[in-house]
Amino acid sequence: MLFKPLNPMLPVWREEPFDDEAYLFEPKWDGARMLLHKQGGRIEAYTRSGMNVTGLFPELQEAAQSIRAHTAILDCEGICLRGDRSVFDDFMHRLRLGRSDKIKQARTSHPAAWIAFDVLLTTGGEHMQEPLLERKRRLDELLEPGPALLKTVCLESKGNALFELTAKQCMEGIVAKRKTSAYKLNMRSPDWLKIKHTQTIDAAIVGYRTNPFQLLIGLQFRTVKNKLVGTVQAGLEAEHREWFFEQIQRDGIRQEGDTFWVEPRLCCRIQYKDRSDTHQLRYTRFVSFLPDKRVEDCVWSYGLQ
């Protein structure tokens, strides 16, 4: 399994935080999941999808110096920090680079680091069948934390307190992990639970569907205007539907299958709890229309979402 793509264990979604003596709770860092493979002086990084991205991150050589074992596979989150915050878009920027001069420059402008939270293998063999608490102990012994490789914060039993703290620090949320859980590759396991904070954003309305009624929402990016970033259905009531159709009745509407595209001129406020690497918003909920807001001002705020 060393230096081969692996599909990491993934958490199941949960709505609300909780306290439980059977669980460990960790902050959810806002970056990209990665597995670091090391053997001697060789270190490689693989994304969750199995892509080898070692060449994009010269910082890996420094990270390797923090791993005491000759051989190891660590489960980590790759991040870029601005102050004390990990910024999703900064790390996505690093993953998009190709030219060596740009990669070298980004090491200064967008320095990367890795937050380790699990160990799959060491010089002594595989550890995936061991309980999480034992793997955490091994991780403590394995790491000599440095600027490029750190161990995540971990709190026993007090999920509500950590959830509140991560909200104050503008982090994504928390992950709850059963203390006895084994590590299961290529599986989304109920032994791990992700609990995210609700985010709010103002979006342009670029279209709609009628069965069921939902709005298609877009945002302004640096290189793309009114980019479709998702749909919203929850929270929309009959009066919202009526108001919306009154506003667009004189507009030119273009139909494609069950989708109706409108001229972006109306805005709405939504809540969401998750987004993809391509900024597709998930677990959305309608809050209100914003008749006085300009669509040009419905902007993805880099580093603030």
Image (spheres, grey):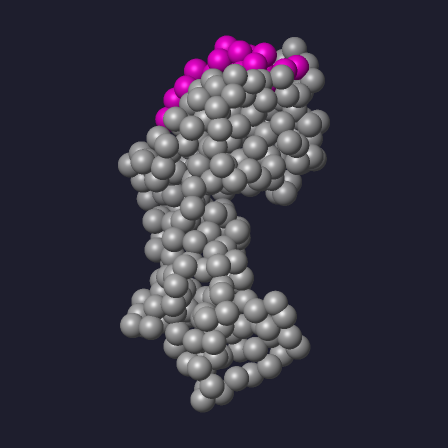
Q: Quadrant of the N terminus?
A: top right
Pick the front one: 166 or 276: 166
Provide the residue span drawn in magenta.
130-152
Up-down relation of residue 274 to residue 252 (above or below): above
The residue under the point 43% across, 54% down is 271
Q: Is residue 38 visible?
A: no
Q: Quadrant of residue 267?
A: bottom left
Pick the front one: 157 or 44: 157
Up-down relation of residue 274 to residue 72 (above or below): below
Q: Where is residue 23 drawn, in percent x and y?
A: 54, 21
Pick the front one: 188 or 271: 271
Q: Where is residue 150 drawn, in percent x and y?
A: 43, 24
Position of 60 with respect to 125 (left or right) is: left
The residue under the point 46% across, 71% down is 239
Q: Is residue 23 visible?
A: yes
Up-down relation of residue 221 to residue 52 (above or below): below
Q: Quadrant of residue 225?
A: bottom left
The residue under the point 64% across, 31% down is 190
Q: Where is residue 243 drawn, in percent x and y?
A: 43, 76
The residue under the point 64% across, 40% down is 50
Residue 125 on the magenta segment = no
Number of numbered discs visible in the structure rendering: 0
Up-down relation of residue 162 to residue 53 (above or below): above
Residue 138 on the magenta segment = yes
Q: Quadrant of residue 162?
A: top left
